[in-house]
Image (cartoon, rainbow, N blue to C red):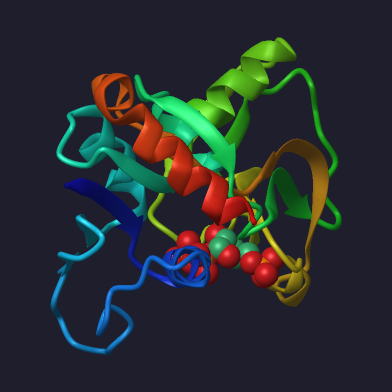
């Protein structure tokens, strides 16, 4: 049996589409119900929806053999897993954004609002800038508009959210997309099956 952790939400639906196109189907998985676990006995596979941020936890601890996680979450959590493939879905970028009239004063500590404190810290350590991190859970765009922070470190996909809140990208941090990750010992024992899945997903 192969256990698969999929991220609940938009990205997970895109990733599931790749699985179903590859012949790995889990009837009812896209229904609007509250069920979280779906098994396909014929394939010997079981899928479960987990919060996107939690996918690496299930995989690192071996509850899931493989999972699909956004690169943002992998950069933030640095899980001890194998990152085996770029699923080429959910393309977006991690960036620093600020109000269009923002002028940086390098003498001052920069106030950075983000859902990704480790990514923000690594980025600013890399350029030698001291920051004050303000960790929030979503709707980050409010922070610079209301004066809670100077900048945000956030995901940008189409740029619409930034534009509609009079913010713009001032620095690029990383390209993001969904990645296929595997538990290290599962990969040792079920590597052939996992590689076969990756091959089919890529076709
Ligand atoms: C993400 C991100 C931005 C938005 C960017 O938020 O945090 O707010 O998408 O997308 P865009 O560039 O296409 O406008 P999400 O919708 O995941 O919700 P959140 O604010 O709760 O994190």
| Of 11 and 1, the residue lying toward us | 1
Provide residue 36's location: percent of width, then percent of height.
16, 69
Question: Residue at point 46% right, 36% down?
Answer: 195
Quarter of the picture containing the C terminus is bottom right
Provide residue 61's location: percent of width, then percent of height.
18, 29
| Of 52 and 155, the residue lying toward us | 52
Residue 174, quarter of the rendered image: top right
Ligand 1 appears in which quadrant?
A: bottom right
Question: Residue at point 49% right, 63% down?
Answer: 15
| Of 174 and 135, the residue lying toward us | 174
Residue 78, quarter of the rendered image: top left
Provide residue 37's location: percent of width, then percent of height.
14, 66
Residue 187 in view here: yes
Q: How many labels, in total? A: 0
Residue 148 in view here: no
Question: Residue at point 69% right, 23% down?
Answer: 108
Provide residue 199's location: percent of width, then percent of height.
56, 45
| Of 101 and 126, the residue lying toward us | 126
Task: Specify whether 112 is left or right of 20.
Answer: right
Task: Specify whether 115 is left or right of 172.
Answer: left
On screen, 1 above or below 145? above
């Amino acid at each position: 049996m192969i256990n698969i952790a999929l991220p609940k939400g938009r990205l997970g639906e895109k990733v599931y589409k790749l699985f179903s196109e590859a012949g790995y189907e889990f009837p009812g998985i896209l229904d609007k119900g509250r069920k979280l676990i779906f098994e396909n006995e014929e394939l010997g596979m079981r899928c479960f929806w987990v919060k996107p941020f939690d996918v690496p936890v299930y995989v690192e601890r071996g509850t899931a053999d493989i999972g699909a996680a956004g690169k943002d979450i992998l950069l933030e959590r640095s899980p001890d897993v194998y990152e085996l493939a770029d699923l080429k879905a959910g393309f977006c970028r991690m960036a620093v954004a600020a109000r269009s009239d923002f002028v940086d004063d390098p003498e001052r500590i920069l106030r950075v609002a983000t859902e990704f404190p480790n990514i923000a810290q690594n980025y600013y350590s890399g350029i030698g800038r001291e920051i004050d991190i303000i960790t929030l859970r979503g709707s980050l765009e409010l922070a610079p508009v209301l004066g809670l922070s100077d900048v945000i470190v956030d995901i940008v996909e189409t740029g619409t959210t930034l534009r509609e809140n009079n913010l713009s990208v001032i620095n690029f941090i990383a390209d993001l997309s969904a990645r296929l990750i595997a538990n290290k010992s599962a990969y040792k024992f079920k590597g052939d099956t996992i590689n076969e899945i990756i091959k089919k997903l890529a076709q």
